[in-house]
Amino acid sequence: MSTSSSSASATPYSSTPATSPAHSVHQKELPADVARRQCDNVIFDIGDVLFTWSAETKTSISGKTLHKILRSATWFEYEKGNIGEQEAYDSVAKEFGLESSEVAAAFQGARDSLAGDARMIAMLHELKEQPGIRLYAMSNISAPDWEVLRHKGRREDWDLFEHVFTSAAARERKPNLGYYRHVLAATGVDAERTAFVDDKLENVLSARSLGLKGVVFQKFEDVERALKIFFRDPIASGEQWLKANAKRMTSETNTGVVLEENFAQLLILEATGDTSLVDYIQYPRLTNFFKNGGVLTTEAFPFDQDSTSIALSVSPHFDDATKHSVMDEILTYRNQDNIVTTYFDRTRPRIDPVVCVNVLTFFYMNGRGDELAATLDWVYDVLKHEAYADGTYYYYGPDTFFYFLSRLIAVSPSVRERFGPLFTSRITKYFGTSGDALALAMRVLGAAVVGLCDKADHERLLSMQEVDGSWPMGWVYKYGASGVLIGNTGLTTALAVNAMKEVEALQRSSS
Amino acid sequence: MLRLALSWWNTPAYPPTLIFDIGDVLFTLSPTSIEESLERYLRNLLGDPVARGREYLQRNSRLLHSITDTPSPIILRENFAKLLILELANDKGLVEIEEHPRLWNFFRAGKGTLTTEVFPYDLDTTSIGLTIMARDEETVNSVMDEMLEYVDSDGIILTYFDHQRPRRLR
């Protein structure tokens, strides 16, 4: 375990590594998507992906039989250019007990039904607008069928492709490896920087086995999202989304209520270091969770140690005297076990380990952590005995505990020394387990603080990014009494962006 | 001995929580989700997983069939899973193996379900069958010789002993 990971340096509680280049500058120099995109090329299937057709013809041959013919060894030979059109029709007619003329008529019907998928074609035109992108098509198709298809499509659509590879010309068909090797050799593309889209899993598997990045086409939206992920910079597009949604990133409950609250705003500010993105109340001393009074709870909602500690550790508007006077006050709100409570309200004597961690972080940042020894001991026991397994009274799931504890570890060398090894063993147990986008981002960020690269969850997080650049909202906290969950798309996106940066920094430092 | 279930309660805010003591040590436990049954949770906590798993296999011997994920699940009479169960449990009493002297079929009696009725012998089931069931060396070598005839243009082994099904995947 490293005790001097990149995130522990310079700005201790910001997840932006100090080594990362100033991002706004970086963006101006390069087109947004080129810098970190994973792919430069795409190889596209044609039949059933770019062009759809119907197997239900006006002939006596059923769609089911037509599909069976298409899967027969004879048809494969036809696709590979080893037999001609008439011979193919005659042979399958014999095998399936049909009239050859009926087979020919059925395939004529199928040809007549061919239609380009307008959305897919439009997406490819958009993809092609990016600098340095090369598109290829690779199809299992006989020479006569290709001749028909070539004239069905519009000239400008076929011009999308540098080249259309047909099985008839290659004398090989997918999923045979020889066909892929032929295409890779002819195009000279780097397989690992090339996406491959096909509706058949076996074809995608062969492609993947040669290093191509395979996408199984099932519906348009999946392909659109997958290609976006391959052909853009996740960090730049996430940051663009944050800017486009500045000051509008409100929280929401799982019951569909919009919440105006300060907490998520402060966390977004900490994650991005950009005050123009957020809108929160700058209280003179103590901070309230809600911006305009309690929603779905008591209207006169008390100020709390959690929001106050986060505000005092994140917002730049407090002076030292204020911080120390608030710490003095917090110390008066401890229960009979000497654990800090949650509210500045002696009628609500609740304790929550995540709240404790956030108060501790505030105290340690100001050199007074040792005044909360009993609270720190309890947090240690919570970690040791995995008491966070189902989340806490106010926080959703185990990853919130890991994330906030990693903030504490990042600011205090003594906490790092005492908690580091145990934290490492506890968080590692969760790598690759379930979680929403926020949970995964928090896990990746928590792991990075102790120098661990959580590759499995980074990869899943990468695949969850939405077409618009955001990450789907994950749950952060909950109403203690009702269990209603609260999430924030902006916070999820801000932390996911930082998770991407952390992994990049870890990979750079290890290579 | 174990004294159990001193008390348990359920409030909207907490998952069901159970307190019990073993000797002098007091434990508080809660299932990982409210949906998880307390009974399963406790059985998993207190039972011996190996003994309980073995006991299940014994109780269901000769009934360990495969099923499909179709809307109404279909019981498949197939050889593959049986061979794997035999290999894992090393207990001939658990599964009824349909003997194949040489090549093996995925389906029992070679009768396909949800596919072609006459189902070809395949290299996958045959390889599993011949690695699990004891066969003389001569048979094994003759089967391997035969398998080498079923390769595609890239030299990759195929799935079926049937040149009309030149597929690598089932």
Image: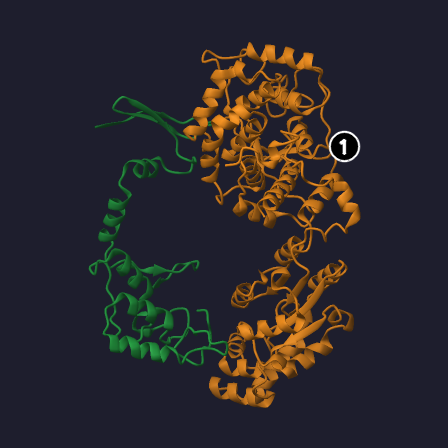
Chain colours: A orange, B green
Residue B69 image position (x, y, % from top left): 42, 58
Residue A171's place in the image compared with A249, above or below, is below
Q: Is residue A380 left or right of residue A328?
A: left
- Rendered image quadrant of residue A313: top right
Is residue B23 found left or right of A475 in the rendered image?
left
Q: Residue at x 49, y 34 (%)?
A: A398
Of the pair A194 and A484, the residue shown nearer to us: A194
Residue found at x 60% / y 48%: A462
Image coordinates for residue B19, horizontal then vertical, percent: 34, 25
Q: At 45% from the left edge and 29% from the top edge, which residue is drawn?
A: A383
Side (left or right) of A391 relative to A470: left
List x then y, in percent, for residue A13: 63, 29
Q: Is residue B107 visible?
A: yes
| Closest to the observer, A189 or B161 | A189
Q: Position of residue A85 (x, y in %)?
A: 60, 87
Task: Reply above or below: A123 against B141.
Answer: above
Can the viewer see residue A53?
no
Residue with the mark numbered 1: A276
Q: Amino acid at mark 1?
A: Ser
Q: Quadrant of residue A307?
A: top right
Dot 1 lies on which element?
helix
- Which of the 4 image quarters holds residue B65? bottom left
